[in-house]
Each structure stands twice: as structure tokens, then as C-alpha cells.
């Protein structure tokens, strides 16, 4: 018995040693992988420090939140028919822009290099004939979307980060079911994490009457580790290939009724008609293939003839782990760098990477009027504290920072020199730049940009401008919490 006990003890010592050895090798290999990925040095250093100091916790965090699928090519889509067509068309537009610079319209000529950037990094086609309506009232926006759905005769395509089982969610659900019964092709994608609270019965009811419904990257054990951190944050509606909606609103009552603690919930959407809707349709087709593993037939009914003659050039830009580049981040960076007079930004979650932060500070120090509107209160404490950690250096560079005092502004917009505007789903933060699937409309039109700027300036009247003297005198305990939130934010 004693011999058995001794042998048993020796056996478990070997097992323990083997497990420890495998664990150490795993941690060391993970560190080597992180270094080899050649990410931002600060982010790389942080991951290495966490893995060295807290190896078990660090390894779990990395598996859940740290893997770089842009490098791993998990989201490979290069065989898609619509993607191939966009590649060919973008190559043709690049040649035309390069060879016909003297024949370009003033709107396009002024931003030709910016347009070429987005053709190269994301194949974002330049569409020239469009009608665009800015929508910033939640009730009016959903009324318009519902009216468009009611008028649909062929297809309804919807993609949202959040679909809620509430009043507006069920109103749209009932309408989609009615349209499906009437023979309209209805397709819906919702993000599985963003719509975590959505009951299974919600989608089941839709499927029962013929609505095609898919969650984006369902998160279920044991596949959680490869999917939890890469979410589809886009908001897209395309009706009959003719009308499109794009921006920052999800399907939730708070956009109409407000939030129980934050108050009124503000956001910005665009209603589009024209060539840009075809680009939105192609984006939906790509995401549909990803969730369903089936391609939608590229028939003419999905891309009807454009009837508008209104000249309003724009690009619909996407970004995400399926791209070789951080497309929307590069678009922000380039537009900031080329500004000559002013830059106005509203972002509910502001955690810029070093490139964008430096570009903003450089612009301000160069005499550009930079104004940034941030929330006075937020629905995400860690992100909010991290955002506040950037305010001091923004103020030091002469940037004007404003805090929303009434409600929560969820808009993701940027206007440059009254001639170029960004509206979309992408926050000015690292998650939107690197991890999420995002979409934005970049508009090259003075009239529409000035409309957005006028609304922005009106919103500033209800904000509190941050005064440098007051900000620098805040208690150490507050600034320390903000600094800690900023340190850990790259991990998530």
C-alpha cells in the first residue's frame, strides 16, 4: 500500500509538472505570436505584461478578446461574386480618377486622393447620383423605415447590431411577417452579442412565416473563444434595392422613448436613394453569405435602375476583420490631416488610437478649429472613464471639448471644412477601428455637410464646454480611475 501511495504521488507530480510545462509553453508561444503580429507597440506591450504578470488570466483574456483575426484571415470572402465585381469596378474608377483629373467635378476633384484611398483599401465605389435625407429624430426615423417596409414589393434586407423585443421591435417584427406572407423576400441579420437579450421565439416567429433570419456569429460554448470579440456593429436597411437607411440607430425603444437613466437618446441616420443604395445592397449580400453560407442571386431586381439626377457624390465604406486595412480609421485619419479650416466630431465612445489622436492634436496646433462633442454621462462606465482620460491632452492642444448635458448623443459623425461628412456606425474608438464590422457613408457635398454642421452647432448650445483650468483641478482619485480605464481599454 505504501508503495502504491508513493507511486501515485510520483505519478501526480509528473502530471502536475507536465501540465505546468505545457502551460508555460502556451504562454510563451502566445507572447511570441503577439510580438510577431507587429501590432501597435503599446498594445503589444500591454498584452505581454498581462501574460507575464497574470499568465492564466492573461491567457483567457487573450483567447476571448485579443486574437487578431485581420491577420488570421478567419473572415475570408474573396470568392464572392459581388466582391469580385466591386474589385473590378473599383479598379476602373481608380484608372478614371488618375487619368481624368482635369475633367473631374469640383466636388470629386477636391477629394480625389481621399476617394482613391477608399477605392484602394476597401473597394468603396464612388457613387455620384444620390438623394440623401438626414434623420436625427428617432420616432420620425422609424416611421420612415416602417413606411418604406410597408411599400416594399420585392425585397427587404435589414442588418442591425441590436434588435430588441420591445414596442418598436415587435412593431417591425409584425410588419416583416406580413410582408413575408405577401410574397416579399425578407432577410434579417442581427448580431448575436448585441442582441443577447432577444428571445429565441422572436426569430422563430419570423422564420415560421418565411422570413429568413440569421444571427451574426452566434456565441455558444465552446466556440465562444473565437467569436466573442468580433461583432457586426453595422446598421443597414435596403428596400427593393431603391431605398436605404444607414447610421447609428438600432431597433430599440430608447431611440424613441429615451433611456430610463440617461434621458433622451439622440442619433443620426441617413435615408438614401440612388447609386449608393446599390453599394449598401452589395454589403448586405456579403454579410448574408457570411451568416448563411449562401449567395443571393445577383439579379437585376436587387439593383434597379437609378432614376435620380441629383449630383451628390459619396462612398459607402466598410471596415472589419475581413479587410487587410483599418479602412474607416484610415478615412478619419486622412480627412483630419487634409482639413484646412475646421473639424467637428460627435462620438459617444471616444478612445482613439495614437494615429488619430496625433492627427487631431496636430490639426488643432496648426490652427484648425477642432471641436469634439462627448457624452456627459454614458451607458458604459469603463469606456466613459477611458474617454475622459483623453480630454486633458485634447485641451492642451487647443481642441474645444463639449460634454452633452441633456440625454445621450449616440451619433457617430464628423464634418470637415463644410465639404465632407462622415455618418455611420463606427465610433471613434479602437474597437470600431480594429474589431467590429462597421459601415459609414462619406459624403462630398457642401449643402449636406453644412446641414449636419448646423445641427452640430445647435447641439453644442445645450452642452457644457470643458474649461482647461477647471479640468486640470479635478481630484486625483478621479484622474487615476480614468488612467486605469485607459490602460485596460486596448484589451477589450
Image (spheres, rainbow, N blue to C red):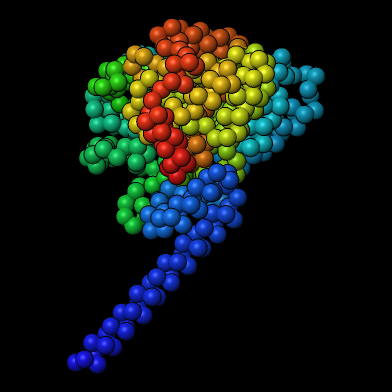
Is 26 on the left or on the right of 450, as rendered? left
Residue shown at 42% from the left, 12% from the top:
464
Nearest the viewer among 280 and 347 is: 347
Residue shown at 24% from the left, 22% from the top:
260
Nearest the viewer among 276 and 136 is: 136
In x, y percent, where is residue 274?
Answer: 55, 20
Residue shown at 50% from the left, 53% from the top:
48
Q: Is residue 102 visible?
A: yes
- Residue 14: which quarter of the image? bottom left
Q: Tell me if residue 230 comes above or below residue 161 in the rendering.
A: below
Q: Which residue in the rendered view is the most extreme toward the left?
A: 1
Is 68 on the left or on the right of 1, as rendered? right
Q: Tell me if residue 466 comes above or below residue 353 in the rendering.
A: above
Image quarter hosting the C terminus: top left
Nearest the viewer among 109 and 436 is: 436
- Residue 95: which quarter of the image? top right
Is 249 on the left or on the right of 299, as rendered? left
Nearest the viewer among 408 and 302 is: 408
- Residue 4: which quarter of the image? bottom left
In x, y percent, where is residue 239?
Answer: 43, 26
Image quarter hosting the N terminus: bottom left
Q: Is residue 134 visible?
A: no
Is 419 on the left or on the right of 109, as rendered? left
In x, y percent, where is residue 298?
Answer: 52, 38
Q: Tell me if residue 69 comes above or below residue 432 in the rendering.
A: below
Residue shown at 43% from the left, 55% from the top:
53
Q: How many marks?
A: 0
In x, y percent, where is residue 240?
Answer: 45, 26
Amino acid at each position: 500500500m505504501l508503495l502504491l501511495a508513493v507511486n501515485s504521488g510520483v505519478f501526480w507530480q509528473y502530471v502536475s509538472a507536465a501540465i505546468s510545462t505545457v502551460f508555460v509553453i502556451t504562454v510563451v508561444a502566445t507572447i511570441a505570436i503577439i510580438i510577431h503580429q507587429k501590432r501597435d507597440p503599446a498594445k503589444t506591450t500591454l498584452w505581454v505584461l498581462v501574460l507575464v504578470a497574470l499568465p492564466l488570466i492573461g491567457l483567457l483574456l487573450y483567447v476571448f478578446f485579443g486574437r487578431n483575426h485581420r491577420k488570421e484571415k478567419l473572415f475570408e470572402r474573396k470568392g464572392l461574386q459581388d466582391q469580385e465585381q466591386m474589385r473590378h469596378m473599383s479598379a476602373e474608377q481608380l484608372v478614371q480618377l488618375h487619368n481624368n483629373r482635369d475633367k473631374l467635378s469640383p466636388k470629386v476633384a477636391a477629394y480625389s486622393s481621399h476617394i482613391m484611398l477608399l477605392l484602394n483599401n476597401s473597394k468603396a465605389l464612388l457613387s455620384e447620383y444620390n438623394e440623401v435625407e438626414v434623420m436625427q429624430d428617432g420616432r420620425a426615423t422609424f416611421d420612415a423605415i416602417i413606411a418604406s417596409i410597408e411599400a416594399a414589393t420585392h425585397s427587404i434586407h435589414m442588418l442591425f447590431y441590436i434588435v430588441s423585443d420591445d414596442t418598436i421591435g415587435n412593431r417591425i417584427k409584425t410588419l416583416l411577417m406580413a410582408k413575408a406572407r405577401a410574397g416579399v423576400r425578407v432577410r434579417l441579420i442581427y448580431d448575436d452579442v448585441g442582441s443577447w437579450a432577444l428571445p429565441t421565439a422572436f426569430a422563430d416567429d419570423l422564420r415560421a412565416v418565411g422570413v429568413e433570419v440569421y444571427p451574426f456569429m452566434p456565441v455558444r460554448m465552446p466556440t465562444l473563444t473565437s467569436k466573442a470579440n468580433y461583432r457586426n456593429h453595422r446598421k443597414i436597411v435596403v428596400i427593393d434595392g431603391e431605398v436605404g437607411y444607414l447610421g447609428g440607430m438600432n431597433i430599440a425603444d430608447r431611440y424613441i422613448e429615451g433611456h430610463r437613466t440617461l434621458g433622451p437618446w439622440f442619433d443620426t441616420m441617413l435615408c438614401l436613394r440612388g447609386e449608393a443604395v446599390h453599394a449598401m445592397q452589395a454589403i448586405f449580400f456579403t454579410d448574408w453569405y457570411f451568416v448563411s453560407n449562401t449567395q443571393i442571386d445577383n439579379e437585376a431586381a436587387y439593383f434597379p435602375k437609378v432614376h435620380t439626377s441629383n449630383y451628390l457624390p459619396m462612398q459607402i465604406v466598410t471596415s472589419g476583420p475581413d479587410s487587410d486595412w483599418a479602412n474607416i480609421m484610415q478615412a478619419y485619419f486622412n480627412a483630419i490631416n487634409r482639413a484646412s479650416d475646421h473639424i467637428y466630431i460627435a462620438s459617444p465612445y471616444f478612445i482613439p488610437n495614437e494615429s488619430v489622436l496625433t492627427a487631431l492634436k496636430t490639426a488643432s496646433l496648426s490652427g484648425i478649429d477642432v471641436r469634439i462633442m462627448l457624452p456627459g454621462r454614458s451607458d458604459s462606465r469603463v469606456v466613459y472613464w477611458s474617454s475622459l482620460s483623453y480630454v486633458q491632452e485634447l485641451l492642451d492642444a487647443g481642441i474645444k471639448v463639449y460634454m452633452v448635458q441633456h440625454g445621450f448623443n449616440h451619433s457617430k459623425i464628423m464634418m470637415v471644412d463644410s465639404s465632407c461628412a462622415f455618418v455611420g456606425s463606427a465610433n471613434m474608438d479602437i474597437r470600431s477601428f480594429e474589431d467590429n464590422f462597421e459601415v459609414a457613408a462619406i459624403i462630398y457635398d457642401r449643402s449636406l455637410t453644412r446641414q449636419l454642421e448646423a445641427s452640430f452647432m445647435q447641439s453644442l448650445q445645450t452642452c457644457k464646454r470643458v474649461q482647461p483650468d477647471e479640468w486640470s483641478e479635478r481630484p486625483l482619485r478621479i484622474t487615476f480611475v480614468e488612467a486605469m480605464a485607459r490602460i485596460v481599454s486596448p484589451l477589450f
